[in-house]
Amino acid sequence: MGAASPGLAGAVMGQARRVGKVGLWHRIDWGGALALEMRRAGLWLPVLLGMGIWLYFALPAEPPAWTAVLAAVPLLAATLSRVRGHLVLRGVVFAALALSMGYALALVNAHRVAAPVLDGPRGLTVEGRVLVLDRSASEAPRVLLDRVTLFGVEEEETPARLRVALLGLDFTNAPRPGEVIRLSATLLPPGDPVEPGGFDFGTRAFFEGIGAVGYSRNPVLRIPSHEAMATDAGGPVDRLFDRLRLWLASTRMDLAEAIRAAVSGASGAFAAAIIVGDRAGIAEVDAEALRISSLAHLLAISGLHMGLLTGLVFAAVRFGLALPARIALRWPTKKVAAVAALLAGAGYLMLSGATVATQRAFVMVGVAFLAVLFDRPAISLRGLALAAAVVLAVRPVSLFDVGFQMSFAATLALVAGYEQLAILSRSRREKAPDAPPLGLRGRILRVALVWTGGLVITSLVAGAATAPFSTYHFNRLAPYGLLANLGAVPVMGLVIAPSAILAALGAPLGLAGLPLGVMGAGIDWVLGVAHATAALPGADRVVPAGASEHLALIALGGLWLALWRGGWRLVGVAPILAGLALWIWLPPQRPVLIVAPNAALVGLMGPEGRALDRAKGQSYAAETWLRRDGDGADQPLAAARPGLEHGRSLRGALGGGWRLEVVNATRPEPGELAALCTPKTLLIARNAAEAPAGACLFYGRAALRRAGAIAVWPGGGGVEGRAQHRSRAPPLEPPQAAERRQRSARAGGPRLRCRGWSGFLTCRAPSGERPAPAS
């Protein structure tokens, strides 16, 4: 990817000037021009890996494990065909190999992390060891348990980990990491998406090994370590790492408490979040202001924090080693500083809890400093591609994390953009080699302009690169995000991060007070910027949900524009513009009806927007639906809208001649259900065990449990909808769970014509069709 390598356009134009006008097309060395571009083909490795990972998750059913060996087929083809001299064929084989490797990595990782998942809501006595203590959405202590025992549940059906909110405790008497506890809790499987295509907490929990979530209002019994079984399970190495992890978790809690004691108020909570990853003390009003002002990324320990820490350590160590002339002349000070920065980053990784975002950030800075050790450019597209490939290889599901998408999009745009700026700057210097040197005032002015311009360009480029992803995932536009970042990010880099490092160095000597005070003042400034920005008119703009196809077009266009060097990279502008145009002028139609899992909440589109059937409860589902509609209303306002008629049943018009009837009675009368079960009626009765006689489309208790969330659109002559597809079971599920799932599938359900794709069913029920009896 060296800067001296001419791009495709340069190679073609140079050849054209030599050959003249006669026979131009035939005499251009297209092979040579393409060969120059193919030097950058390796940059597409993580993209192709990601496509293979997406292919695995897009399959409607769990594929056989043996399909992972398909990754060897392209490698075998490359070996047998000897394609060294065939440029296009080499590219095809490389793409096929990377795609199949991505598929195999996703499949193998899914089988590696597979663990039992609780099959339904149950009240159980739980025993387990506390791994993590944090705060739930209701502000209650919440624990993550491993080495779990569920009394009354077979061992092969017991989840490896579960998360429980302790509603009867506060943080002063909550159990600490490493303690073994026993309690009675209400447990249920990790939540399904609240609408088809929405965020799937169940998938995230599966890959984190969490097989159940729940709450407890009962006392917690602490089990002495000598009575707790399997506390020291595993070999010596496992026990060593286990104890190290628990010690780090306990140390992290102590440090968070000490930081909040030293830096009072909201600034202390912010400081604990960015130093040790403890976000439990962040007030919701501050978190909301940071989200609206597009400064929420400052709270997550990710690339910015890891880059600031390791960069400051690298600069400080290298500067310190450069002072003594003997060391500066004899030692490889740059490499020593790189090792020091790597060690600092590793320590920060462990101290902050080693979250997925922090691991990803450490991989990125690790690749950069390893490049320094091997005398390669520290910041380059090759290093970024290697970091992305490593992250996807270790944790393939990271492809769908918004943090992965936004961090690599921003970094890719910045590296590619500054690479082009460097080429332009070098070209300008070559054209004017005899330019007079600048005086002192000119040099100072140039440094100021470069610093200010770099800050503005960095914020613009990173903001533009991440805006499609943040808008798609959060349905929010931050029109003042650039302004807020210009005001807050420099303070983060020049005040807060250096003060945190000085506080860490001075803490053993009791000298952390002054740096922590300076850091608190910097955090006060950042929070002030966030609240001031959030208070501006129009600062929080909610936008409707976009289509994944539109985002994919924009992403592929951006990748094409950034990864190639020649003139043909400008072709990437076309899909970017096409994706933006489709997103703005042809947004996906929102469903007229959404039903949460088990019909816990119903939302019907009315004349004033989506009307909800209740003003309280299921707040996450209500907030998600309204936000994805592009609707800024809250749940009580939406519940007061026209569109749903409340009576003995809940009813409304779906369009296309169809109507909705929802019966919430605890014991619905068969005669009442039969009277409602008429043609062109979607009848939902979450407590009904049997289907009524009639020609309606009926969802009872069992069918709702299998379907998950339901979304319905009016379609010509019928209704079209999507429901969560429950037939794709996790790999290596327990035999008992498989038997129950098969029995549930044989029980039947509404007879819809369905086509499976990406974990969901697209279904159609024409008017007049008689569904099979179901419940």
Image (cartoon, rainbow, N blue to C red):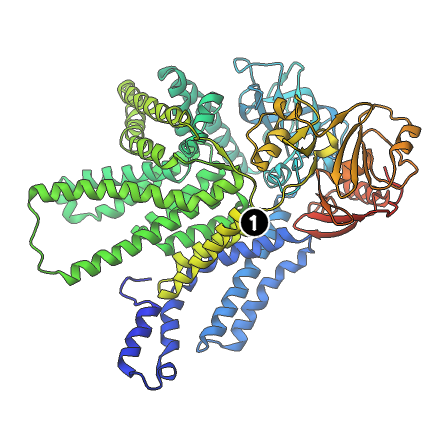
- Residue positioned 79% across, 37% down in the render: 659
Residue type at mark 1 is Leu
Callout 1: SS: loop
From this viewpoint, is residue 146 visible?
no
From this viewpoint, is residue 438 visible?
yes
Q: Which of 147 and 727 is in front in this view?
A: 727
Q: Quadrant of residue 146?
A: top right
Q: In which quarter of the image is the N terminus?
A: bottom left
Q: Quadrant of residue 16?
A: bottom left
Residue 351, given in percent of the width and then of the height, sits at 42, 31
355 lies left or right of 204: left
- Residue positioned 32% across, 51% down in the render: 379
Residue 418, given in percent of the width and then of the height, sits at 30, 51
Q: Quadrant of the C terminus?
A: top right
Disc 1 marks which residue?
Answer: 586
- Residue positioned 52% across, 61% down in the render: 98
Q: Nearer the viewer, residue 330 or 748?
A: 748
772 lies left or right of 144: right
Up the image or down, 151 lies above or below 28; here it is: above
Q: How crowded is mark 1: few (under 14 residues within 10 Å), some or many (20 or more)?
A: few
Residue 701, given in percent of the width and then of the height, sits at 81, 33
Q: Which of 462 and 698 is in front in this view?
A: 698
